[in-house]
Image: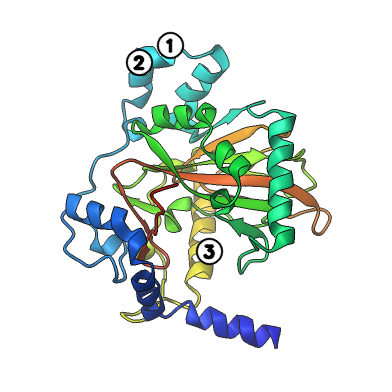
Amino acid sequence: MRKWLDRYSGRLRTIKANYVLLNLLGHRRLGHARRMFQRYGLTRSPLLPISSAHMPKTPGEVPWLDRPDARQRLLDDPRVQALPTSLRQAVLDWPDKGYLILRDVFTTDEVDRVNRELQKLIDSGVVDFNFTGRKVMFAFRKSPAIKAMASDRRIVEVLDLLLGRPMHVFQTINFLTGSEQAPHSDSIHMTTYPLGYLAAAWVALEPITADNGPLMFFPGSHRLPYLLNDGFAHGGSRFTLGQDAYAHYEAAVQRSIDEGRFNPHEFHAQPGDVLIWHANLLHGGKKMSTANASRRSMAVHYFAEDVLCYHELTQRVAMIDEDH
């Protein structure tokens, strides 16, 4: 029965009309999309399926640290020169590496508070795992501690500098175990126009080692061309999404890794350490040495002010609660 339900629900997720209905039911959360459609000259209704194929033909503004002169601009920027030495070097390396690490950002008390509130929300049924069985989505809407950590200025001020615009929390994803997710770029799931105006912060909420499924990432892979629906065998039609689209996407990503000879790095961390990465940096979750080993952590995705946010793979605009 469970296999039948999974197969049936999987097929439902490929029908574009279902997302149109969800958009209609959640129309109050499409205010941001409507404003951005107007800003960028999109005449299509935000209720309808949308992807990179519908974006303006011009690429739009390129984030300042994705430009060829990024390192020199950083060297000339007085804000960068005023940073502590270790952070200054990490920011200078961002254009080449696509990530940086902040150690000891959160205290033991701050980490413990998040872990306690999340467990309480799970135990009471206020939040639950998504269809993957591993991710608790948007818990920051229910937990003051999670919301405070996600919006902490020690992270957001770094992101504001890296992206060159004010950054806003879009979503949180909490994990109790490793994701074991294949390498991917966030931009296939949470896309922006113009491209590149999204970033992520990953917070360790307990010790992360080689054994409990650490996050792995591929330095420099953010400079690859963005892999969007037109870059792999999506298999969709006017009315449906491709049933095996994500498998084809993962295969295309792996080919890019192999052809570019990118080497994976693992983020081994102590509670309160933070990894920040570029919208297009390839990353995933290493397989756990022990099945279901505890690996409490939180990923937070942020988008820049005045950009359109949408979901390339499922071809729908992002619903945004603007009071959060």
Q: Earlier in the sequence, mark 3 or mark 1?
A: 1
Residue that appears at 59% across and 36% down: 275
- Identify the element where label 3 is drawn: helix
Q: Tell me whether circle 2 and circle 1 mark residues in contact (CB < 8 Å).
A: yes
> Which amino acid type is marked by label 3?
Ala
The percent position of residue 156, horizontal first and vertical second, equals 47, 32
| Disc 3 packing (10 Å; few <14; some 14–19; many ≥20) | some
* Image quarter (top left, top right, bottom left or bottom right) of the N terminus: bottom right
Residue that carries the numbered disc 3 in the rendered image: 251
- Identify the element where label 2 is drawn: loop
The percent position of residue 235, horizontal first and vertical second, equals 41, 76
How far apart, in angstroms, are the residues tagged by discs 3 and 1?
41 Å
How far apart, in angstroms, are the residues tagged by discs 2 and 1?
7 Å
Quarter of the view holding residue 237 = bottom left
Residue that carries the numbered disc 1 in the rendered image: 81
Image-based side of 94 in relation to 124, left or right: left
How far apart, in angstroms, are the residues tagged by discs 2 and 3?
40 Å
Residue that appears at 45% across and 78% down: 14
Mark whose residue sits in front, 2 or 3? 2
Mark whose residue sits in front, 3 or 1? 1
Quarter of the view holding residue 131 = bottom right
Residue that appears at 41% across and 66% down: 232
> Which amino acid type is marked by label 2?
Asp
Residue that carries the numbered disc 2 in the rendered image: 77
- Identify the element where label 1 is drawn: helix
Image-based side of 7 in relation to 111, left or right: left
Toward the right, the furthest residue is: 290
| Disc 2 packing (10 Å; few <14; some 14–19; many ≥20) | few
Residue that appears at 62% across and 40% down: 145
Q: Is residue 69 visible?
A: yes
